[in-house]
Amino acid sequence: MKKAKKKEDNKVKYGTISLPMPLIDKVKQRIKGTGMNSVSGFVGFVLRQVLSTPTKDSLLNKGQEKEIKERLKSLGYL
Protein backbone atom coordinates (compact mmCIF):
# COMPACT_ATOMS: atom_id res chain seq x y z
CA MET A 1 0.00 0.00 0.00
CA LYS A 2 1.40 3.40 -1.00
CA LYS A 3 1.81 6.12 1.58
CA ALA A 4 -0.10 9.32 1.05
CA LYS A 5 2.07 12.32 0.24
CA LYS A 6 2.53 14.77 3.03
CA LYS A 7 1.48 18.37 2.42
CA GLU A 8 5.10 19.46 2.86
CA ASP A 9 5.99 17.61 -0.36
CA ASN A 10 3.85 20.07 -2.35
CA LYS A 11 5.21 23.26 -0.80
CA VAL A 12 7.03 25.64 -3.08
CA LYS A 13 10.38 26.80 -1.79
CA TYR A 14 11.25 30.48 -2.07
CA GLY A 15 14.50 32.33 -2.53
CA THR A 16 15.53 35.92 -2.18
CA ILE A 17 16.60 38.38 -4.84
CA SER A 18 17.87 41.93 -4.46
CA LEU A 19 16.48 44.86 -6.38
CA PRO A 20 17.58 48.50 -6.33
CA MET A 21 15.35 50.60 -4.04
CA PRO A 22 14.33 52.98 -6.86
CA LEU A 23 12.95 49.98 -8.77
CA ILE A 24 11.12 48.71 -5.70
CA ASP A 25 9.61 52.18 -5.22
CA LYS A 26 8.41 52.20 -8.85
CA VAL A 27 6.82 48.78 -8.40
CA LYS A 28 5.06 49.96 -5.23
CA GLN A 29 3.65 52.92 -7.15
CA ARG A 30 2.60 50.67 -10.05
CA ILE A 31 0.71 48.18 -7.85
CA LYS A 32 -1.24 50.74 -5.80
CA GLY A 33 -4.94 50.04 -6.19
CA THR A 34 -4.46 46.95 -8.34
CA GLY A 35 -5.12 44.23 -5.78
CA MET A 36 -1.52 43.09 -6.10
CA ASN A 37 -0.41 43.18 -2.49
CA SER A 38 3.37 42.93 -2.65
CA VAL A 39 6.43 43.72 -4.70
CA SER A 40 7.31 40.00 -4.63
CA GLY A 41 3.90 39.07 -6.01
CA PHE A 42 4.23 41.60 -8.84
CA VAL A 43 7.77 40.51 -9.73
CA GLY A 44 6.68 36.85 -9.73
CA PHE A 45 3.71 37.69 -11.98
CA VAL A 46 5.86 39.64 -14.44
CA LEU A 47 8.51 36.92 -14.57
CA ARG A 48 5.89 34.22 -15.23
CA GLN A 49 4.55 36.32 -18.10
CA VAL A 50 8.00 36.87 -19.59
CA LEU A 51 9.06 33.24 -19.21
CA SER A 52 5.85 31.92 -20.77
CA THR A 53 6.56 33.83 -23.99
CA PRO A 54 8.11 31.58 -26.65
CA THR A 55 11.80 32.16 -27.25
CA LYS A 56 13.49 32.15 -30.63
CA ASP A 57 14.78 28.64 -29.89
CA SER A 58 11.27 27.31 -29.25
CA LEU A 59 9.90 28.57 -32.57
CA LEU A 60 9.81 26.32 -35.62
CA ASN A 61 12.41 26.79 -38.30
CA LYS A 62 11.35 26.91 -41.95
CA GLY A 63 12.16 23.21 -42.52
CA GLN A 64 10.10 22.10 -39.53
CA GLU A 65 7.21 24.32 -40.57
CA LYS A 66 7.31 22.88 -44.10
CA GLU A 67 7.30 19.30 -42.75
CA ILE A 68 4.30 20.02 -40.56
CA LYS A 69 2.38 21.66 -43.40
CA GLU A 70 3.12 18.70 -45.69
CA ARG A 71 1.96 16.26 -43.01
CA LEU A 72 -1.23 18.24 -42.39
CA LYS A 73 -1.89 18.40 -46.14
CA SER A 74 -1.43 14.62 -46.48
CA LEU A 75 -3.94 14.16 -43.66
CA GLY A 76 -6.45 16.41 -45.45
CA TYR A 77 -6.24 19.42 -43.16
CA LEU A 78 -4.76 21.88 -45.66
Image (cartoon, grey):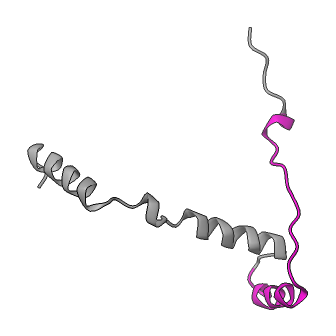
Depicted 54 relative to depicted 4: above or below: below
Residue 4 image-quadrant placement: top right
Tell me where residue 21 appears, x and y as whole percent: 90, 86
Q: Quadrant of the C terminus?
A: bottom left
Q: Nearer the viewer, residue 53 or 76?
A: 53
The magenta segment: 7-34
Task: Reply yes or no: does residue 27 show up in magenta.
Answer: yes
Tell me where residue 67 appears, x and y as whole percent: 20, 50
Lateral position of residue 35 relative to residue 46, left or right: right
Residue at image location 79% in from the left, 17% down from the top: 3
Tell me where residue 44 appears, x and y as whole percent: 74, 67
| Farthest-out residue, top | 1
Residue at image location 52% in from the left, 67% down from the top: 53
Task: Reply yes or no: does residue 14 show up in magenta.
Answer: yes
Residue 35 image-quadrant placement: bottom right
Residue at image location 86% in from the left, 58% down from the top: 15
